[in-house]
Every structure is written in structure tokens, then in C-alpha cells.
Amino acid sequence: MIQSLGRINELAKKQREEGLTNAEIVEQTVLREDYLREIRGQVLDTFSGLKVLDPLGNDVTPEKLREEQKIN
């Protein structure tokens, strides 16, 4: 699990209930950006390991993905 997710949720709850200070708004923005960066990295890691097969079992992985897989 992503470490900052608990704090993001705390700030979201506080924002709904009573509002946030300017410092908390900045913190929330930074935490959300870090969270999204981490999620995007996980998605890219997952996609870089994929192999695409057609219904007949032939490898139809896009050439761009194959090139990325060779690099990594």
C-alpha cells in the first residue's frame, strides 16, 4: 500500500468536515501529486511486462512495446 494514502484520506475527510488551512492544502496537493506519480509508475511497470496475443495465440505485441521491453 502507498504510504501517503492514509494522510491523503485524513486531509480529504477534514476538508469535507471543517476545511483546511493553507499549509494543509499545500500538503494535500503535494501528497496527491506524489500518489499519482507512484500509481503511474506502477501502471507503466505492469504494461511494460505485457505480451499481447490474438485469439489464435499469435504474438501481436505492438512494436513500440517490444522495443521498450528490450531496453528494460
Image (cartoon, grey):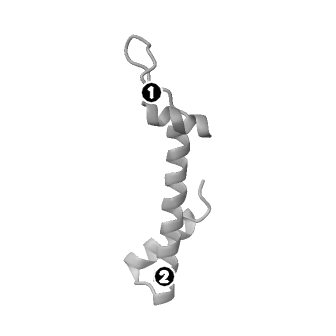
- 1 or 18, which is in the foreground? 1
Whether label 1 touches label 2, CB < 8 Å: no
What amino acid is at disc 2? Answer: Val
Query: Which residue is painted at 52% across and 79% down in the image?
Result: 27
Query: Which residue is painted at 60% across and 39% down in the image?
Result: 71
Query: Which residue is painted at 54% across and 48% down in the image?
Result: 42
Q: Position of residue 65 (x, y in %)?
A: 48, 35
Q: Is residue 15 left or right of residue 67?
A: left
- Residue beneath disc 2: 26
Q: CA distance from mark 1 to mark 2?
A: 42 Å
Q: Position of residue 54 (x, y in %)?
A: 38, 18
Disc 2 crowd rating (10 Å Cα; few below 14, some 14-19, many 20+) is: few
Screen quadrant of the C terminus: top right
Q: Secondary structure at mark 1?
A: loop
Query: Which residue is painted at 51% across and 46% down in the image?
Result: 44
Q: Position of residue 39 (x, y in %)?
A: 51, 54
Instruction: Say which of marks 1 and 2 sits in front.
Output: 1
First along the sequence among labels 1 and 2? 2
- Residue beneath disc 1: 61
What amino acid is at disc 1? Answer: Thr
- 61 or 32, which is in the foreground? 61
The image shows residue 15, relative to residue 21, as above or below, that is above
The image shows residue 60, relative to residue 24, as above or below, that is above
